[in-house]
Amino acid sequence: MKLWGGRFESGPAKLFEDFSESLSFDRRLLEADLVGSKAWALALERVGILSAEERSRIHEAFDRMLEASRDPSYLDGATDEDIHTFVIRKLEEEAGAVAGKIHTGRSRNEQVATDFRWWLKGEIRASQQRLTGVMAALLDFAQREPNAVLPGYTHLRRAQAVLWSHYCLAYFEMFARDWERLEQAHDRADVLPYGSGALAGSGFPHDREAIARDLGFSKISRNSLDVVSDRDFALDFLFAASTTMLHISRLAEDWILYSSEEFGFMEPGDEVTTGSSLMPQKRNPDALELIRGKTGPVIGSLHALMVTIKGLPLAYNRDLQEDKPPVFNAADHLAGALEVLELAIRTTQIRPAVMEKAAQDSWTQATALAEFLARRGVPFHRAHQIAGGLVLASVKEGKKPQDWTLEQLQAIAPEFDAEAAELLQVRRALENHTPPGGTAPATVQAACQAAADRLAAMRREP
């Protein structure tokens, strides 16, 4: 069945039909097409193309199709060109000749754009929900280990100690920005194309605001030429998805390292690890590695759509059939990664004693000592040299920070006093970072509460 053909003496070659079919991937737009077509039938009734009785028959047919589509086998055996042709064929079977009116004044261009936007809006909301699940898991982890100390790193070298909860909040902030980017992508997708025709606008006096309300869009497009060929909203989603995956991948990389024997800071749960087919002792962080690996295809999807769009003249071109596979691919990878990451967070156990010993023994307190001296009036360059000299002496003598007595410290620099000696304990050094955003215990406790409030607002907002 074709929705066109009067201009042609014969049909396209079978080879070309096979090459151009899209039902194999756009089938997931079935619900969007049925819901959108119901709204279009109502719009046709408003302009007098359909009678109330005809519109009712069409709506009843679409409702039956929606119900039947709950069965995963509903599309089995279909050989239609695409999901839109499938819907029209099924409508004729359900409603009879009146089905021929449903496409009055409607271009495939605006139909596809509307379906795609409607579907993507729902997918973005689902992604945001999964993302808040990850954020909640991080907050729970932070709150169940409020006193654990972790060596923070720069250049993958131990730098300054931080609370584990402060570390969890760092990723919470990344994911909060990801949630906001998805919200912006949703806002860009939340624009109705219906009523734009093929490119020049509809030839019927449709109430586009009414169609937007029927379909749950908050805005209508301003320019018909633009909206039928616009896929910026898909790029916005792909960029948001790619950035989210980058952050997920960074966390996965941290935990792959932290769970290795060389670090020994944590133990992922059995739920997210696997063994070796040869080596009985192995416990591999496969879930985290897969999360890291699936970041590549998502970033690739962004690049793929950008390259598809980059040379297209206005308005619609058939190249845009290829807009959906990268979006579907990225959405699937993002959904899986977020769900597995939440499971990994909730089933991983940390080893606070190992983490704290690493922070204590590796001079992560050195900066706190230099800052102490600076508060005592020592120029910071001199303070930095004194603290660095103390570390050098420790390395040469094989001493840990806690091995130094006050008298020995004062032999290095008379500016050291009893308070400075206390800073050799990593937990005391943590208290040096009291401004908002720092890792002092009271500051982090307040940040956790603020994060919980923000998360609650995110879960209410959509």
Image (cartoon, grey):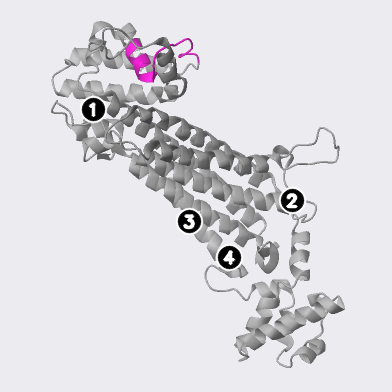
- Residue lying at 21% horizontally and 39% vertically, measured from the top left: 223
Residue that carries the numbered disc 3 in the rendered image = 453
Callout 2: few (<14), some (14-19), or many (20+) C-alpha neighbours within 10 Å?
Answer: many
Q: Nearer the viewer, mark 3 or mark 1?
A: 1
Q: Amino acid at mark 2?
A: Ser
Q: Amino acid at mark 4?
A: Val
Q: Amino acid at mark 1?
A: Ala
Magenta-colored span: 73-89
Callout 3: few (<14), some (14-19), or many (20+) C-alpha neighbours within 10 Å?
Answer: few
Which of the two labelled residues, at mark 3 and mark 2, occupies the earlier sequence position? 2
Q: CA distance from mark 2 to mark 4?
A: 24 Å
Find residue 4 and report its horizontal and vertical position in percent: 27, 14
Q: CA distance from mark 3 to mark 2?
A: 31 Å
Q: Amino acid at mark 3?
A: Asp
- Residue lying at 75% horizontally and 83% vertically, measured from the top left: 389
Q: Nearer the viewer, mark 1 or mark 2?
A: 1
Residue that carries the numbered disc 4 in the rendered image = 444
Callout 4: few (<14), some (14-19), or many (20+) C-alpha neighbours within 10 Å?
Answer: many
Residue that carries the numbered disc 1 in the rendered image = 198
- Residue lying at 60% horizontally and 73% vertically, measured from the top left: 433
